Amino acid sequence: MAGVEARDFSAPDETRAPEKTKVDIVRMGGTSASRMSMQPGWKWSECIKPVAGTDSCQIHHVGVLVSGTLHVAHEDGSEHDIGAGQAYVIEPGHDAWVVGDEPVVGYEFDARAAEEYAKGA
């Protein structure tokens, strides 16, 4: 079908797996999307900071959570929980962690985030 490209996350183009994290990336139509899975006990500042090499997450996230609860603490002092079924935008300059015992799974649609998150310098 012309003008349509569909990809399955079960066959990603790339997978990154820092501690307690799995990021699957699919590339299509000149853009990228990612499925991010974080296990209970995951915290950006503990699991991704060593890979990213920055004091806080500097990625712009746009996505939707399909399971779990993610707590985001922004450098401006604001904090927010994001739950399953919620769409979100998270601006750069934050820490985040999994709340409770359920893994967090989300799909993200910012191509830069997909290409750079948990990749390292």
Image (cartoon, rainbow, N blue to C red):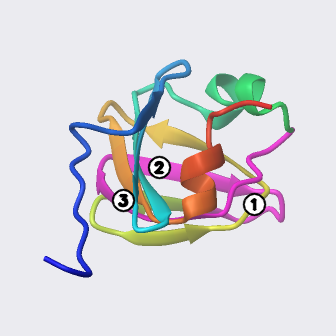
Is residue 55 shown above or below 85?
Answer: above
Q: Furthest-bottom residue in view?
A: 3
Quadrant where the image shows the C terminus:
top right
Q: Residue at x 36, y 42 (%)?
A: 104
What element does badge 1 sit on? loop
x and y percentages locating residue 22 in the rendered image: 43, 30
Q: Quadrant of residue 60?
A: bottom right
Q: Residue at x 21, y 38 (%)?
A: 10
Is residue 112 shown above or below 88?
Answer: above
* Mark 2 or mark 1, earlier in chain: 2
Disc 2 versus disc 1: nearer the observer: 1
x and y percentages locating residue 108 in the rendered image: 44, 59
Q: In this image, 46 relative to 61: left or right?
A: right
| Relative depth, front residue between 90 and 114 | 114
Disc 3 versus disc 1: nearer the observer: 1
Residue with the mark numbered 2: 70
Is residue 84 shown above or below 22?
Answer: below
Residue with the mark numbered 1: 92
Q: Which portion, as a residue range, is magenta?
A: 55-79
Amino acid marked by disc 3: Gly
Residue with the mark numbered 3: 83
Query: What separation in Å lies between label 3 and label 1 (alpha carbons)?
Result: 19 Å
Query: What separation in Å lies between label 3 and label 2 (alpha carbons)?
Result: 7 Å
Amino acid marked by disc 1: Pro
CB atoms of marks 2 and 1 within 8 Å: no
Quadrant where the image shows the N terminus:
bottom left
Q: Residue 77 in magenta? A: yes
Query: What separation in Å lies between label 2 and label 1 (alpha carbons)?
Result: 16 Å
Amino acid marked by disc 2: Leu
Q: Return the mark for residue 11.
A: none
Q: Residue 83 in magenta? A: no
